[in-house]
Amino acid sequence: MKLAFTLNGRPCATEAPAHWTVLDLLRDGLSLMGTKYGCGEGVCGTCTVLADGRPIRACLVLAAHARGRALVTVEGLETEGRLDPLQTAFAERGAAQCGFCTPGMLLAAKALLIENPAPTADEVRDALSGNLCRCTGYTKIVEAVLAAAPGSG
Ligand code: FES
Ligand code: FES
């Protein structure tokens, strides 16, 4: 099937098998490897990307869902060579260790900050509750999101 959508701010026209998920489309179709394949069952959140500003689990959503939408992956967080404040905060505060969960965490956090520029720690924990991390114990991730919130301080 033919698909046209916006990917990280640029128009994208491509073709994909009808059974592909958004994750297949990104990784196998478009060679964007930043979005990770974890469980493949909607449990771990590591495949999280944004579709029209909302987080989706790319392993669960069919590629056809992308049609006409604006997708953002971790590759699209940087603008004009500058890291997103979330990326900087994750790096500075040790919120990424092995890094496997990090793309999904960043996109889930980005969706939260779009909706709520000044979240509380509980709101951050709630927004990231579907994203699993085996390394950090989550505290540094929550601290990083709070530090990056445009409405903080
Ligand atoms: S790979 Fe999609 S939720 Fe785990
Ligand atoms: S940093 Fe390793 S799984 Fe989160």
Image: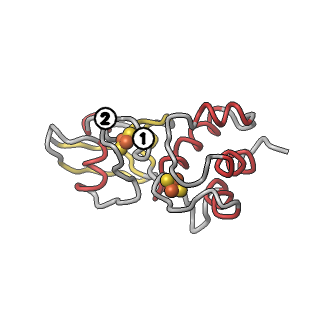
Q: Residues within 10 Å of mark 1 (few under 14, many from 20)?
A: some
The residue beneath circle 2 is 60
Q: Residues within 10 Å of mark 2 (few under 14, many from 20)?
A: some
* Residue 131 in picture, x, y percent from top left: 50, 40
Q: Amino acid at mark 1?
A: Cys
- Is ligand 1 closer than 8 angstroms to the Cβ of mark 1? yes
Q: In x, y percent, where is residue 54?
A: 49, 34
* Quarter of the image where the C terminus is located: top right
**Which residue is rendered at x = 28% and y = 57% of the image?**
30
Is residue 113 left or right of 101 when viewed as pictured?
right
Residue 111, position as x, y percentages in the image: 56, 38
Q: Which is nearer the eye, 91 or 115?
A: 91
Can residue 13 be seen in this snapshot?
yes
Depicted 94 relative to depicted 60: above or below? below
Quarter occupied by the N terminus: top left
Residue 9, percent across and down? 46, 51
Q: Mark 1 sits on what residue?
A: 44
Can you name the residue that lies furthest to the right here? 153
- 98 up-or-down from 2: above or below: below
**Left or right, 39 with reference to 81:** left
Q: Is mark 2 within 8 Å of ligand 1?
A: yes
